[in-house]
Image: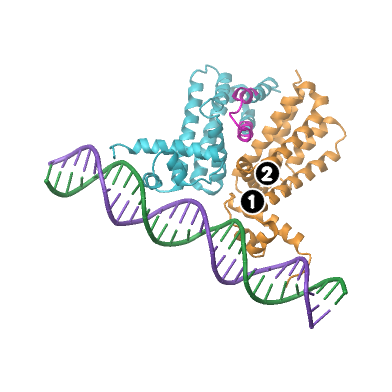
Chain colours: A orange, B cyan, C purple, D green
DNA sequence: GCGGTTATTGATTGACGAGTCAATAAACAT
DNA sequence: ATGTTTATTGACTCGTCAATCAATAACCGC
């Protein structure tokens, strides 16, 4: 029963199923057949639309990065001063679309994939550059030339909180994670020595 | 030409080769044959001594954790006050035996493995508990009841710096990494509000 | 209602890789 | 010397899985 215009729906279903499957397995060692089954189609169709397993993963990764980007942008849009801008980047990073067990597990795995896939590495760099520049933009007026190192520390801390969240079963504590990073930020701003 | 007493040498060679191979590939997706070849033996022998691929990985992980533990212990042994104790834990984490490209890549992969292997998860928890208690022991006299959250932050920051180091090719900057975390520590101690 | 496009899958191929095994050989014990 | 234990490997088995393909079916413009 082929309905026309299925391509975008199928692609989206596969991306979703990929994130779910990788999240559930906690590993990229999942088969195309598993993903396709969860998306309600045959593995042949998955190959038809994406060509290869790697492309399926990369599409999933792009989706995660795009959701993350949208969330940070959303948080940023309401910020009216530098301090709120930096806080927005942090809070956006722990928003409900990104800071979920599935997405975190996928994130961790894509970090690993970036070690061997040039394309994955490129995507990860895009995200890191964007986060860095978002942070710097807000930090510069607040801490001047110390903005670089401070952004570095914030970025590393956020990444660290993420992977630690990957290890807990069930949904991670958004509030606690966010507070921890925001507290660090406060310290950096207070002690402006 | 079998020389007797080969077992410990072979096991050690396999552990070393595993860390090298995983580090080079940036992935656990390496074959037992690759590891065995690098260790200068047949894959059959690797299976003979370890039984399964997973056991080879776990032995490698235990080796990494044990080196890490020894380094932290070594750093701690020269600390004479709480502040130096905390600094020792941090500096031990970035000592040359652990904070190397290969070991970092392996670490990241074992983090992933811990999502699906109960044994790997157990080992990781051992390390995390030890680090936590090391930090708490030094922090309690310095920041009192805030020791818990502060240890949390330091731990996450160290983990974050580690995975970020995984993405750079070549050897990571030990000094910069260590300084970044120590600076965070100073802030936590200074602003003791 | 016919050629072309899109959707879809079951079956198949082909490769690869973990783990087993039988066979060989050196060392050791007695 | 002879049997036992340890070391070692090449060859093999057996699954698994990515990727392909031929076949089927629905829709579309004409």
Query: Residues at marks 2 and 1, common chain?
Result: yes
B189 sits to left or right of D7: right
- Residue indicated by mark 2: A119
Q: Is residue A19 visible?
A: no
Query: Under tag 1, what secondary structure?
Result: helix
Q: Position of residue B111 (x, y in %)?
A: 56, 41
Query: Under tag 2, what secondary structure?
Result: helix
Dot placed on the residue nearer the N-terminal end, 2 or 1 = 1
Magenta stretch mostly in which secondary structure? helix
Q: Is residue B90 magenta?
A: no
Q: Position of residue B162 (x, y in %)?
A: 60, 33
Question: Which sits in the foreground, B21 or C24?
Answer: C24
Q: Position of residue B137 (x, y in %)?
A: 55, 26
The residue located at (37%, 38%) in the rendering is: B10
The residue located at (59%, 30%) in the rendering is: B170
Give the number of marks: 2
Q: Is residue B161 magenta?
A: yes
Question: Which sits in the foreground, B61 or B134?
Answer: B61
The N terminus of chain B: image quadrant: top left
Q: Position of residue B2 (x, y in %)?
A: 29, 40
* Chain of the residue under the numbered disc 2 shown in the image: A
Q: Is residue B64 visible?
A: yes
User: Which region of the structure is painted magenta?
Assistant: B157-179
The residue located at (58%, 19%) in the rendering is: B83
Question: Which sits in the foreground, A115 or D9?
Answer: D9
- Residue indicated by mark 1: A54
Q: Is residue A116 above or below residue B73?
A: below
Quarter assignment of residue B36: top left
Quarter assignment of residue B150: top right
Marks 2 & 1, CB-CB < 8 Å contact: yes
B30 sits to left or right of B3: right
């Amino acid at each position: 029963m082929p309905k026309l215009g299925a391509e975008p729906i199928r692609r989206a279903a596969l991306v979703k199923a990929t994130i779910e499957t990788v999240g559930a397995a906690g590993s990229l060692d999942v088969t195309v057949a598993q993903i396709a089954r969860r998306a309600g189609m045959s593995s042949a169709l998955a190959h038809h639309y994406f060509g290869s397993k790697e492309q399926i993963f990369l599409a999933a990764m792009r989706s995660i990065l795009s959701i993350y980007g949208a969330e940070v942008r959303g948080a940023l849009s309401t910020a009216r001063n530098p301090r709120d801008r930096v806080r927005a980047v942090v809070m956006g990073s722990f928003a409900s679309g990104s800071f979920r067990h599935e997405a975190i597990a996928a994130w961790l795995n894509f970090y690993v994939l970036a070690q061997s896939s040039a394309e994955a590495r490129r995507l990860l760099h895009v995200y890191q550059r964007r986060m860095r520049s978002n942070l710097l933009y807000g930090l510069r007026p607040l801490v001047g030339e110390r903005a670089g190192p401070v952004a570095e520390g914030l970025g590393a801390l956020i990444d660290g909180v993420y992977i630690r969240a990957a290890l807990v079963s069930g949904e991670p504590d958004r509030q606690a994670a966010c507070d921890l990073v925001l507290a660090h930020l406060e310290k950096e701003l207070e002690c402006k020595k």
